[in-house]
Amino acid sequence: MAELKVLIVDDEAGIRSGVSRILNRFRVTYPFMDEAYTYKVLEAETGEKGLEIIDSEQPDIVLLDNKLPGISGVEVLDYIKQKNYDIVVAMITSYASLDVALRATRDGATDFIPKPFTPQELKSSIENITKQQYLKRITSRMKEEGKKIRFRFLSVLSHELKSPLNAVEGYLNMMRDREAGNDINDYAEMIERSIQRIQGMRTLIMDLLDFTKIKLEVKKDKVVELDPALLMTQCVETINPLAIQKDVSIVIEKKSDVIISADEEDMNIIFNNLLSNAVKYNKEGGQVVITIDREGNDAVMEVKDTGIGISSEDQQVLFNEFVRIKNDKTRNIAGSGLGLSIVKKIADLYQGSITVASRPDEGSVFKLKLPVRQEKE
């Protein structure tokens, strides 16, 4: 078995002992893991003591209260972030401090556990955090171990599909057995929830497939001269059904004739991700404007939308792996948290860049820069 260190930082002795007692014999395992995980609980009654343990013990998980004697939990969270420690943080706080927990989540905390909590609520949160930590670490290892880890990553896909598949199967069985009656309208909510889960599965599958296609270097035999305007036009045709459904108009403005040298498959992944996000996170009746221009030796593709926007805090982590912006406006939008990290990885491969400028409720502008046509070797 593998052991994860869990540090509980809380000034209430009852909370600390409760966490220790609950996790003492708790274990977590998933089909895609090599072994089960158990937990060693460390305790700190103040933020200062917590920092000492963080530096000396390097825990894997920190359960962090915000209201502490001395430095606050948010300050401890900021310290972990500045040190760039490989630690998953969950805020453990009262319902009265829920707004603090939400802000902390935007600042890097993975989750929050409102107290008082039941043993099952704590176990459920730890189980989810363990899965996220495992996924994050195996993603890092993918860069070093190549295909072997990539195949294992596909087993994560199979596991993540089980829950939505079970839900859809359950709804279909209920409809088959007419459990809500014979009126089709009585099943409208079941049908809608099934559609949402299917959309989520499709997104996850496509993003993970794209993720496994990313190369550690550009294959020169697949690099060809490409017209970004033509590729964008093809991507618009692909995304247009969703745009029509949301009443979102898409406009392409070609300001300069530019040619890039790249693998067409890589560019399609980038353009499709940027364009689909611009439509998905847009408002009903909104607009997407795609601008293609040139700045010096770079081809510049801007995708501007009139959507829900992104806070400055969320923009800082937007291109990280498995990051999904969670708020009331994104709750029903399917996503894997991989799309923009894939865009950044591919842009980096071509010595390019991807940036974002955004304001909540005003929209976003994603700016992709790629070198113009390179000389063939």
Image (cartoon, rainbow, N blue to C red):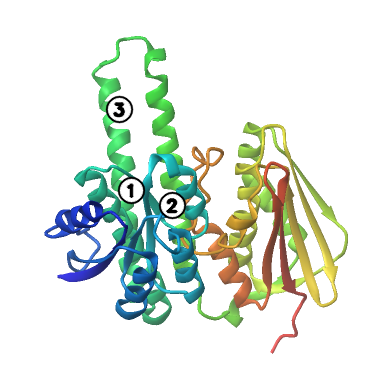
- Of mark 3 and mark 2, the one earlier in the sequence is 3
Residue at the bottom extreme of this rendering: 377
Query: For the point 43% across and 33% down, which residue is it?
Result: 195
Q: Name the residue beneath numbered marker 3.
A: 172
CA distance for labels 3 and 2:
22 Å
Q: Is residue 140 above or below residue 274?
A: below
Amino acid type at image mark 1: Leu
Mark 3 vs mark 2, foreground winner is 2
How far across and down, in percent of the image, does residue 43 sit?
A: 25, 65
Q: Where is the C terminus found, in terms of image quarters?
A: bottom right
Question: Up-down: is 123 above or below 220?
Answer: above
Q: Which mark is residue 161?
A: 1
Residue 324 in view here: no
Mark number, residue 204? 2
Query: Looking at the picture, which amino acid does disc 2 mark?
Result: Leu
Give the Cα separation between the discs numbered 3 and 1. Answer: 17 Å
The extreme front residue here reads 69
Q: Residue at x 26, y 44 (%)?
A: 121
Q: Residues within 10 Å of mark 1 (few under 14, many from 20)?
A: some
Q: Counting residues from the N terminus, which is met first, the one under dot 3 or under dot 1?
A: 1
Which one is nearer the viewer's eye here, 61 or 365?
61
The one of 284 and 1 positioned closer to us in this rendering: 1
> Helix, strand, or loop for circle 1?
helix
Q: Residues within 10 Å of mark 2 (few under 14, many from 20)?
A: many
Contact check, label 2 and label 1, Cβ < 8 Å: yes
Q: Look at 72% across and 37% down and name the residue there.
A: 286
Hey, what amino acid is under mark 3?
A: Leu
Query: Please, what secondary structure does the residue beneath circle 2 have?
Result: helix
